[in-house]
Image (spheres, rainbow, N blue to C red):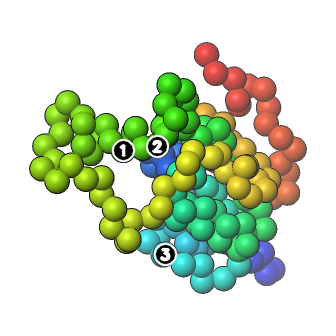
Amino acid sequence: MSELPKARIATASLAGCFGCHMAILDIDERLLELMKLVDVDRSPLTDKKRFTQRCDIGIIEGGCCNEENVHVLHDFRRNCDVLIALGQCAIMGGLPAMRNAIMHSDAPLRECLDEAFVTGRYIRNTTHNVPNDPALPLLLDEVYPCSQVVEIDYQIPGCAPGGDIIFDTLSKLLTGKFRGFEREMIRFD
């Protein structure tokens, strides 16, 4: 009896706290069960920085706040058959998107940078300059959810989603049984 080939998955973290990757680890011992079904390609979990081949499933956490995030997200869309937005930052921009809501300023991004690097109460910056090294990724005018940059196939809500919903979704996707989320899985108290 021949075994089915393993699926390939990839993961990435964009603008966020990396909590969704920690939530993947909350799958606990079921990770061993999952690893029987998948090989992990590009991911902070494997420390692979580039795709080695096309992947069946890509999992993205975090929103897009700079040009590097947009590049990574486009790369995942090109290299993954199914793309999953994992967590509120990927789905709605999350906490990083709070800077989008600064309404009293004509240049909210400039105001955030000035507060962080020049005028902040506890800042000791003798140059009074905002870091502007060309090696730093260019910040976007706003933080964007992944669905505003590329097409997203599935969204797993939560901040961070629990290990149970991540495991359940991946298991069902890998076996062709995913038909959406049960209400109990996405209810928040």
Dot 1 alpha-carbon crowd within 10 angstroms: few under 14, some 14 to 19, many 20 or more: some
Between 13 and 165, the one lying in front of the other is 13
Name the amino acid, label 1.
Answer: Leu
Position of residue 37 measured from the top left corner of the image (x, y, whole percent): 67, 66
Q: Which residue is mark 2?
A: 109
The amino acid sitting under disc 3 is Lys
Question: Which residue carries the number 3 mark?
Answer: 49
* Percent of width and height locating residue 86: 63, 47
Instruction: Indicate the position of residue 145 as horizontal and vertical percent values.
Output: 65, 45
Q: Quadrant of residue 137?
A: bottom left
Q: Marks 3 and 1, how far apart in space?
A: 29 Å
Other-residue count near label 2 (Cα within 10 Å), few / some / many at <14 / 14–19 / ≥20: some
From the image, state whether disc 2 or disc 3 is nearer to you.
2
User: Disc 3 or disc 1, which is closer to the eye?
Assistant: 1
Tag 2 secondary structure: helix
Pointers 3 and 1 in contact (C-beta within 8 Å): no
Query: Please, which residue is most extreme toward the front here?
Result: 106
Quadrant position of residue 51? bottom right
Are dots 1 and 2 in contact, CB under 8 Å?
Answer: yes
